[in-house]
Amino acid sequence: MDIKSNRTYKAAQKLLDAGLYTQSIHCWYYTVLQMAKFKLAHCGQKPLSYEQQMQNNSLSRGSSHDWLLFEICNRLSNKRVKNTFEEDFSFLKEDRVSADYRLKDFTQEEAACCKEISERMLANLRYIK
């Protein structure tokens, strides 16, 4: 999944470079989700295999992405990092929904902001124990 996340990151960058700003938002969001799934599967504190993640996702009442956020945040020991990760997740998720399902056209600056948030989130995943 880490390889998939890295490839999604590269795709997002290519979309950004090509001026496809709205289309890049989807990739900035999913590169974080894919890496989060990898971290959950390989963390030292209560790892969840990909199979367990799929099973728990199907049993969760809300969004599977919200369940993933909950599991990630439970493994972030630094409160500041946890709060930042949650805020960034909400912001990036809202932009991804707008990019995928609404008539919003993102500007270069907005897409660059999503890239920056995605990179911060990826960096913060290193704090998972």
Image (spheres, rainbow, N blue to C red):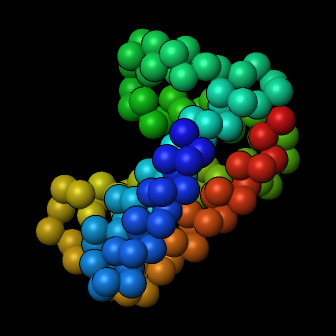
Q: Is residue 116 above or below residue 125?
A: below
Q: Is residue 8 left or right of residue 84?
A: left
Mark yes or no: residue 72 visible: no
Residue most toward the left? 103
Q: Against 112, is 101 above or below?
A: above
What's the residue at 79%, 55% (across, down)? 80
> Would residue 26 appear left or right of 76 to someone viewing this image?
left
The residue located at (78%, 40%) in the rendering is: 128
Relative to 120, 88 lies left or right: left
What residue is shown at x 30% (from left), y 85% (from top)?
19
Give the vertical position of 102 relative to 112 (above or below): above
User: How many numbered circles are shown?
Assistant: 0
Question: Does residue 27 show up?
Answer: yes
Residue 9: give x, y in percent of width and height.
Answer: 49, 62
Task: List x then y, in percent, for residue 55.
Answer: 46, 13
Residue 58 vertical position relative to residue 16 in the rendered view, above or below: above
Quadrant of the image containing the N terminus:
top right
Q: Relative to the observer, which residue lies in front, 27 or 8?
A: 8
Residue 96 coordinates in the image, percent (x, y): 35, 58
Could you tell me which quadrant the C terminus lies in?
Answer: top right
Q: Residue 60: image x %, image y %? A: 43, 18
At a point 35% along the width and 59% down the height, the residue shown is 26
In the image, 120 versus 104, the foreground residue is 120
